[in-house]
Image (cartoon, rainbow, N blue to C red):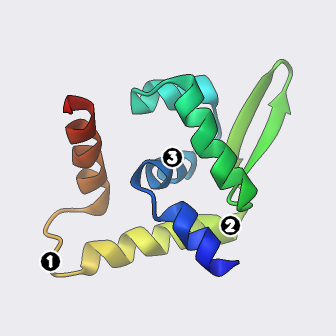
Amino acid sequence: MAARLFRAIGDTPRLRLLALLGQGEACVTELAQAEGENISTISQRLRVLRSEHLVVRKRRGKHINYGLADQHVMDLIFNALAHASEVPAIKQPVITQLLKEKQNEQRS
């Protein structure tokens, strides 16, 4: 179970989604705009995160918002990013590194 959870978190685009959802709930359209991705791509990533109980969805009228499942997920993501930024080989904050990786993916 833990290995599947870490595999889900270990994918950079899914980790970025979790970091975004750590800032508050959002719908698929908002996440797609923030990531510069197709809605179907974001939906697929959210499906994986939901299957590992990292993300929950909440209906708000006609819209469905996604958010982190609970405080444990928030703590896990925060601690993982904090730990990664402490590693001497990484000279820039993890979020900055993730954003640069995203820009490089879009250029390819």
Q: Residue type at mark 1: give it.
A: Ala
Nearest to N terminus: mark 1 or mark 3 = 3
Coordinates of residue 105 in the picture (x, y in percent): 26, 39
The quarter of the rendered structure image containing the N terminus is: bottom right
Viewer-closest of 40 and 30? 40
Coordinates of residue 77 in the picture (x, y in percent): 51, 66
Coordinates of residue 60 in the picture (x, y in percent): 82, 27
Badge nearest the viewer, 3 or 2? 3
Residues at marks 3 and 2 touching, judged by CB atoms closer than 8 Å: no
Q: Residue at x 16, y 81 (%)?
A: 88
Q: Residue at x 63, y 66 (%)?
A: 73
Name which quarter of the figure residue 42 lies in: top right
Badge 3 is on which residue?
A: 17
Badge 2 is on which residue?
A: 71
As helix, strand or loop, the secondary structure at mark 1 comes to loop
Mark drawn on residue 89: 1
